[in-house]
Image (cartoon, grey):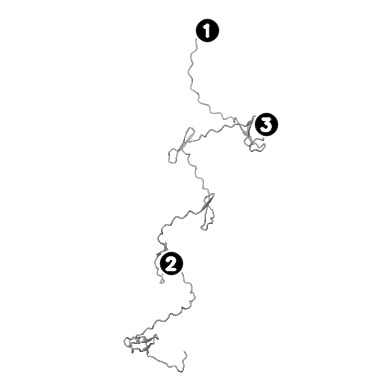
Amino acid sequence: MTVTKKATALQLRSGSTADHNTFIGLPGEITVNEDTWNIIIHNGVTPGVAAAGDQGIQGDQGIQGETGDKGDKPAHGWSGTSLEFEDPDGSPGGFVDLKGEQGIQGLKGDKPAHAWTGTDLAFEDPAGVMGTPVALKGDQGIQGLKGDKPAHIWIGTSVVFENPDGTPGTSVDLKGDQGESFTVDSSGFFATRSAFDEELAGFSFLATDTTNLYLKNTDTSGDWSAAIPFGKGEPGIQGIQGIQGIQGIQGVAGADTSFINSLIFGG
């Protein structure tokens, strides 16, 4: 501090805080607290009275200091959806359940756009772009054991299978409708087949010398099918001999021939 020659020093009475707590100064007297170096203004009645002045204008905010080092992560523990932090004194702070109550169910959204490619399924992304197809068909499993033959009965040409619950199922007639008879378009010796080379697809020719049937595959000239055996098949295997029939009734007795014999043989 610089002191000028014309300055006049002013020294006031002073004392400690304890001294001021018992000292009653003159009204308006000023003393100095040597412990805090605060000025005390007395009212002549109360010991240690200090008149507070009006609060000054708030000063400008200081410059922000440098960021300190990152502190350690606080110790904590989970119990289900509840979290507990360690207090500064090292004691557990108590668990707080972070799972809130279930909210009200929202409105059902629109079905997302999707596309099938065989057994692959692709959904449209939120951006409107079709996503990657996902194959929903898994690998073929191991073949299971052969099950028992289902119980069934025949009624003419109809068959009835037993249902899994043991009841008889619906009768199904396995006899189909009578097919249309086949008529050969032309026939003759195989050597004459070439006369029909220009016929249209489906034309039939029966070679009577080989009993083979030939069909035109296309409209192309001479485009015949391979030989197809036609007509009488191979002889079947001889069946088992049938059971002997019941013996017939004995026939009526013939007329007496003794008279005729006597005439012929003289007997």
Q: Earlier in the sequence, mark 1 or mark 2?
A: 2
Q: Nearer the viewer, residue 122 or 16?
A: 122
**What amino acid is at disc 2?**
His
Estimate the x, y position of residue 55 in percent, counting from the top left: 40, 81
Estimate the x, y position of residue 77 in percent, counting from the top left: 43, 65
Determine the secondary structure under disc 2. Answer: strand
Which of discs 1 and 3 lies nearer the camera? The answer is: 3
For residue 192, which numbered disc appears in the image?
3
* Mark 2 Cα-neighbour bin, 10 Å: few <14, some 14–19, many ≥20: some
Estimate the x, y position of residue 53 in percent, counting from the top left: 38, 83
Q: Earlier in the sequence, mark 3 or mark 2?
A: 2
Most extreme residue toward the bottom, as rendered?
5
Is mark 3 in CB contact (under 8 Å) with mark 2? no
Left or right, 197 with respect to 130, comes to right
Determine the secondary structure under disc 1. Answer: helix
**What amino acid is at disc 1?**
Ile
Which of discs 3 and 2 lies nearer the camera? The answer is: 3
* Mark 1 Cα-neighbour bin, 10 Å: few <14, some 14–19, many ≥20: few
What residue is pinned by disc 2?
A: 76
Q: How far apart are the alpha carbons under marks 3 and 2?
A: 103 Å
Q: Is residue 145 above or below residue 82?
A: above
Left or right, 102 with respect to 261, comes to left
* Mark 3 Cα-neighbour bin, 10 Å: few <14, some 14–19, many ≥20: few
Specify the quadrant of the image occupied by residue 34. bottom left
Estimate the x, y position of residue 87 in percent, counting from the top left: 41, 70
Left or right, 4 with respect to 20, comes to right
Left or right, 22 with respect to 84, comes to left
What residue is pinned by disc 1?
A: 260
Q: Earlier in the sequence, mark 1 or mark 3?
A: 3
